[in-house]
Image (cartoon, coloured by chain):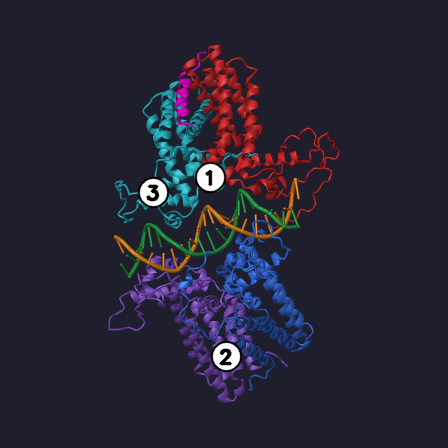
Chain colours: A blue, B purple, C red, D cyan, E orange, F green
Amino acid sequence: MASSRKASLAAPDEIDVDVDIVVDPSPATEREPRPKPKPKPTARRRGRPVDSDGLTRERILVAARECFAEAGYTAASTHMVASRVGLTTGALYHHFGSKRELYLAVFTEVEQLVDERFRAVATPHATFVAKVEAILDETGRLSTTDPAVAGFALSVTGDVARHPDLREAFTSAWARRDFFFGEVVDAGIATGELAAADRTVVLDTVTTLVTGLLVISNGIPVAQARAVEGAKRLLAGTLIVS
Amino acid sequence: MASSRKASLAAPDEIDVDVDIVVDPSPATEREPRPKPKPKPTARRRGRPVDSDGLTRERILVAARECFAEAGYTAASTHMVASRVGLTTGALYHHFGSKRELYLAVFTEVEQLVDERFRAVATPHATFVAKVEAILDETGRLSTTDPAVAGFALSVTGDVARHPDLREAFTSAWARRDFFFGEVVDAGIATGELAAADRTVVLDTVTTLVTGLLVISNGIPVAQARAVEGAKRLLAGTLIVS
Amino acid sequence: MASSRKASLAAPDEIDVDVDIVVDPSPATEREPRPKPKPKPTARRRGRPVDSDGLTRERILVAARECFAEAGYTAASTHMVASRVGLTTGALYHHFGSKRELYLAVFTEVEQLVDERFRAVATPHATFVAKVEAILDETGRLSTTDPAVAGFALSVTGDVARHPDLREAFTSAWARRDFFFGEVVDAGIATGELAAADRTVVLDTVTTLVTGLLVISNGIPVAQARAVEGAKRLLAGTLIVS
Amino acid sequence: MASSRKASLAAPDEIDVDVDIVVDPSPATEREPRPKPKPKPTARRRGRPVDSDGLTRERILVAARECFAEAGYTAASTHMVASRVGLTTGALYHHFGSKRELYLAVFTEVEQLVDERFRAVATPHATFVAKVEAILDETGRLSTTDPAVAGFALSVTGDVARHPDLREAFTSAWARRDFFFGEVVDAGIATGELAAADRTVVLDTVTTLVTGLLVISNGIPVAQARAVEGAKRLLAGTLIVS
DNA sequence: GATGAATGAGCCTTCATTCAT
DNA sequence: TATGAATGAAGGCTCATTCAT
């Protein structure tokens, strides 16, 4: 209800082109009790909702993930998250103690999800190159099917750097991913693809690639697809004729 | 006319309020982009020496760069910038019409600086690989000597994605860098190092690498150094034994 | 909020009523988890069905008294009270219609209790001075044994002044105490200790002393003890050598 | 600064204030454009051009004093203070960093004022009794001419007990007053009116009396006047016939 | 009777921005 | 040019209260 007002500005350059930043596929304009199969147009009543299904917490997490991905920690407001779920900010605090806590919860969930996906696609393969290729592919897939996850993953870097109090969970998560990537590299050393001395170098290189892909995806999806291919060919040694 | 707002955005409404308006006698329909008659002192006119103005302006830009790099667009406050220069926020508005304008100015400057540095180190080399290696090295150097620049470069990705109204300058800048990287790739095609058909793939791959390095640098500098090495060896084909 | 679901507790055999379960002097100290409803197996029921209501109600009153004493009307939240009893705020509303009503209930109870204690210690004595001394002593005792009562008694003054809608009960209570103190003074007039003309002066002076003691006690207990002695000696005329 | 606090605590409370009851004839009720800045001879200190309107700060302090006196720390909102001065809450923060800081500033000012007044009236007298009588009289005068000061002075006890972070200034202030009262008592010992052994007892008794008067004044002004008389006669030994 | 979920108002605080000086 | 004061819109969070279950 507060809104209205900026109507006046309306971006004159409606033309807008290209880029078109990612954006969540499910708009959820505002205020709509959205993910509900049964919309129930009436404004929410004061007490406990009739259709409470216990999924609210999960819905909040999803909305929060999108918001943080789209706007970052600071710019994403609790109101933004709440209204996307069709709640008031107060209700959010019934489920999460603070914005920070909410962020951390989203973080944990996302981090776990990404870790699982990477692990799932990499494990079946035997060689380092095959594993990394699978990871790169998965990175692309992730950005496509789950833009919010990718967006969030990107946001994290900046958000955490800026808000020291978010760092706690981040550190452990980063360690976990590092650990996983480490396993991949070690597999390469085992197969002889990599020199043991190059362990950290390779580790950081892979991390850089994946990070770069994640960032790129937030801008131009097509570019990411090509970059994935390029990265794979770089690994395979078929990109540069030499 | 219902302001057609891209449903896509969802981002916060930072958009400058546009309260604007001085008593505008013209009908409301007019949608002036902003009656700001900013002088745009970029182009020096009349031999008039910049009277300290240029000096303060530059100091503000430097401070702003740091702030935006450290905190991101939303979280960096005008006060933070002003106080770093030893001014009050009000004074800022003598040099820049708004936070957004300031950001754009910083952006332009940084983008130009980065472009110049990349160009400077790449040009002397003849081959694609050599050029890219030089760029990668320069990326590392940049992060070390000019963390604010690197930080800002990183922030940009997120900030721009989140604040549609910042996009304008971003698009052109991105195009410029793309253009430069395009030249580098073309050089590779000319030397036969790359297949013409791979142009875009390589372009995006290089971009991804550089982007990844920039992001990484904001977290663990050491990792970046190693990643630079790894990336170079990847290009050279000496990272993976195969 | 973490708040693990309490599910359990239940305690079906809550029927017991007993005499009155004196106010448990050591209720949940602070936000501690729920105070575990003590089973009290040897429940013996009286003829009344007493549905445990009286019990919970009393526990709430005790907790509320403490909270209001500690934090004042505004700052004491319903949550603070509820959690101290091991309930949710919603449950509070089963026993009291509103925070205000709860406050009023506590008020009435406390006021009555104080009145009774003062009356009990003063009555046995015959002279004004003896009665007042007894009251002063009792004030000290009250602050020590029942800090919550003393704290609340003090709080009242301010809370009532600030929240006009609480005034109703206050007025009558004040009248009651005034009435009692009036009796004490009248006793003094009867014995010839006081001049009839001084009635109101003495009345207000005694009130002031007691009030002062109550306030002081909330800060430094020791000081109160000394003040009690001082006041008594002032009455006895042995404080100032003259 | 720990200030001995009883573990059992129970803390005091908002003590009161009540200035109201009668329509407060004071300042701009709400939204008033701005009370004409009464030309208090701007004693511009130091050449520093603090600007002409150094009065706003003072106006805020006055309003805050009233608000805190009337409502206590918790219940007095920044909005309440701001609107009374004809400002928005935001403006408050231009002058005081936080509500707490504002409170502390008011506190310091009030404490100083009270101290000065007490000192001023007590000093001229030679005997303990005379000094105390003067103080008691001044307490009454204070409550009448400056209800906000008296109200605030009273509120302090409760507010400080409840908000530990306000304690800092309080402790020192309390010490200061104690010190002054100590001097008064010492004067009594010097004149032989008091036994040296009774020092603390007398000290606490006087404090209790003054405190009680302050509290009472917030409720029924007339009662206070009578209590002042009663207290003086108690000291003089003419209240009780004996 | 009690819980859990929700609301809506209000609070403290921050911030971009304006404007008189 | 620069400052200082001020505004108005949020923002994060708390709270009394309501109700379906």
Q: Residue C11 lies in magenta, yes or no?
A: no
Among the two numbered marks 1 and 3 on one chain, the one whose residue lies closer to the N terminus:
3
Q: Tag 1, which secondary structure?
A: helix
- Tell me the amino acid under the disc marked 3: Arg
| Of residues B41 and D207, the one drawn nearer to the viewer in this rendering | B41
Q: Residue A223, how many percent across, how many down?
A: 53, 77
Q: Which residue is mark 2?
A: B133
Q: Residues within 10 Å of mark 3 (few under 14, many from 20)?
A: some
Check the residue under mark 3 and report the chain it is in: D
Q: Which mark is residue D59?
A: 3
- Tell me the amino acid under the disc marked 2: Glu
Q: Residues within 10 Å of mark 2 (few under 14, many from 20)?
A: many
Residue B87 in view (yes/no): no
| Of residues A99 and A80, the one drawn nearer to the viewer in this rendering | A80
Residue A152 in view (yes/no): yes
Q: Which mark is residue A54?
A: none
Q: Nearer the viewer, mark 2 or mark 3?
A: 3
Q: Tag 3, which secondary structure?
A: helix
The C terminus of chain B sits in image quarter: bottom right
Labels 2 and 1 touching (C-beta < 8 A): no
Q: Tag 2, which secondary structure?
A: helix
Q: Is residue C135 above or below residue B174?
A: above
Q: Which residues are magenta?
A: D220-242
Between the residue at mark 2 and the residue at mark 1, the CA separation in whole angstroms equals: 62 Å
Q: Main secondary structure of the magenta part?
A: helix
Between the residue at mark 2 and the residue at mark 3, the CA separation in whole angstroms equals: 66 Å
- Tell me the amino acid under the disc marked 1: Arg
Q: Which mark is residue D167?
A: 1
Q: Quadrant of residue D218?
A: top left
